[in-house]
Image (cartoon, grey):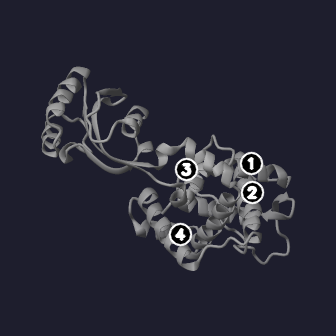
Amino acid sequence: MSIKIRRYVSMGILPVLIALPLSGCGQGTSNKVAIVATYKGGTVTQTEMDNYINVLSLVNPQVNASTNTAKTQIVQQYIAIDRILANKATQAGFKASSATIQNETSQFKNQVIQQSYNNSTQSFNQKVQSLKLTGSDVSKTISNELAVEQYAASLIPKSDLNTYYKQHLSSFTLTTQHGILVKSKAQAEKIYTMLQANHSASNWDKLAKEYSQDPGSKNNGGLYTNQPASNWVPQYAKAVTTQPIGKVGQPFDTTYGWFVVEVLARTVEPLSTVTSQVKNQMLSDASSKYAFTNLVNQAEKQADIKVTLPSSGS
């Protein structure tokens, strides 16, 4: 699952999943339909908004849509993403395959159950029933989101893609290294001296078990294999991307303590193999002009959205 709970959560657009399709859901048979929002090209009914909020509540039981301010934000972003951007994606020919939708839906459901329902499928199913939702709601959600995701990525020019890749090489540089974390500079220098004399794998293993404060690697010779350099704090990332391979580097300080590191291998993944990853990072990066939040904000402004909700409590 590439970007979950789906991309938009990590971007902070809403504290829950967005891009949930409401078209065709709960339209009702009444001749009089309450309209809660209008925009260039369409309207959103009270029934559609209520259904949308129910789906948000399924994904995140803590969601608070009790105020008109919250509801207004939800409706605005629903219109921007699920109506306007989804329509543009469809017109541009972006559509996920049935197999992809099925796989993404399954993974998404499992993640929601784990994160929001304490791994209880029964609790999840009970919530679905209480909200009067169906299993197709989530699968439609994923289908719509994947199409919007593909559309947003298609808007990034190759020249800007290449520039961003070069500026963020640490995200696409895989390194394998031994590392020992200790509390003091003096202790780090002592370990550095011992490893200078013997930096065999067996000695790394011995010293890591004896001294390292890193629970993730101390019982494995301090070894991390094929990890993106961007995973680490800046000082560690700099060390693993600049130190000569096969030599024990000078001790360096970080927010976690002092490290001694030996880089065993380093590979920069070519742009041709990480194009999708670079695009995903650009869409998630708030500092990028192609950040998905910017696309949503632009769609909202161009849509001339007018939300007319009844007074709270009415």
Query: What is the number of the mark on residue 80?
Result: 2
Query: Quick one: label 2 or label 3, which is nearer the N terminus?
Result: 3
Mark 3: secondary structure: helix
Residue 35 in percent (x, y) is at: 83, 62
Query: Quick one: label 3 or label 1, which is nearer the N terminus?
Result: 3
Residue 170 in percent (x, y) is at: 47, 43
What's the residue type where badge 3 is placed? Ser
Asked if the residue at tag 1 contacts the one at tag 2, i.e. Cβ–Cβ closer than 8 Å, the answer is: yes
100 w.r.t. 304: above or below:
below
Query: Quick one: label 4 or label 2, which is nearer the N terminus?
Result: 2
Q: Answer left or right for 112 relative to 134.
A: left
Residue 127 in percent (x, y) is at: 51, 66
Query: Quick one: label 4 or label 1, which is nearer the N terminus?
Result: 4
Give the residue pinned by disc 4: 128
Residue, x 71% and y 61% (percent of image)? 49
Separation (CA) of disc 2 from disc 3? 18 Å
Residue 145 in percent (x, y) is at: 63, 64
